[in-house]
Amino acid sequence: MDRIKLKVFGLSYQSMSQTGAYALILAEENDAFRIPIIIGIAEAQSIAIQMEHLHSQRPLTHDLMKSLADSLGVVLEEVYIYRWESGIFYSELRFRNGEELLKIDSRTSDAIALALRYNCPIYIAASVIAKTAIPISDLATGEFSGQKPVEPEKSETTEYNFTIEELTRLLDEAVKNEDYESASRFRDMLKARKEE
């Protein structure tokens, strides 16, 4: 299977990392894993408003985009997260205009905000899952499945010298604090250490 359907699990404020950054948490439909994506405050606000079924006094950018697409007769059929490279997720919007399929490159945060407004499916490539997903069983047990790890960057050499026990403790603390950015980094370092 080369693509998996996702759902939006929630948002988490990342106070321990960049100011004003949020983690958008995506999950597999059966809750087998979580994928954290760091997004900005404007995108987080737009996603949160839609998730909570709230209405702003004036249209937000994503509301405007949907209104424009609706008035032109195009419908967002699905969002596809097709690549992850150097910490960046790549997505495309797949619109339908009659018989024509339109594929438009998009930031993942914008794509998710629109997917929520259209109530359309969100898919992710299996290759992206292998690089970015945190399996639920791994979060609960501290053990890791055989997914291919992402190599830590050279700037993380101090953290990379932690013992397996220290990395496991740091991972557990990051998950408890809902700091998914750090959790994914510690997960990757722990996987790499176990394969040495």
Image (cartoon, rainbow, N blue to C red):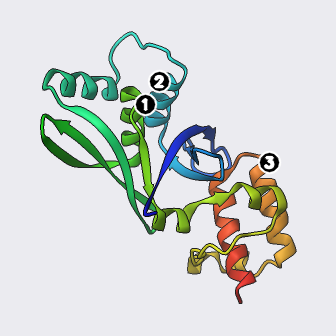
Question: Regarding mark 2 in the picture, which secondary structure is present there?
Answer: helix
Using a 10 Å C-alpha cutoff, classify the residue at mark 1 as few (fewer than 14 neighbours), some (14 to 19) or many (20 or more).
some
Q: Is residue 36 left or right of residue 74?
A: right
Q: Position of residue 113 (x, y in %)?
A: 41, 34
Element at label 3: helix
The answer to whether marks 1 and 2 mark residues whose Cβ atoms lie closer than 8 Å is: yes
**Which quadrant: the C terminus?**
bottom right
Vertical placement of residue 10 versus 156, above or below:
above
Residue drawn at (12%, 39%), measured in percent from left and top? Answer: 99
Q: Residue furthest top?
A: 57
Q: Please state which amino acid type lies under the numbered disc 2.
A: Gln
Which residue does the image show at 49% across and 45% down from the upper left? 39
Q: Amino acid at mark 1?
A: Leu
Mark before the other along the chain sequence, 1 or 2: 2
Residue 50: which disc? 2
Q: Name the kind of residue labelled 3 in the image.
A: Lys
Query: Relative to 88, is 71 on the left or the right?
Result: left
**Residue bearing the label numbered 3:** 176
For the residues labelled 1 and 2, the Cα–Cα distance comes to 7 Å
Residue at 52% across, 51% down: 37
Residue shown at 84% from the left, 61% from the top = 141
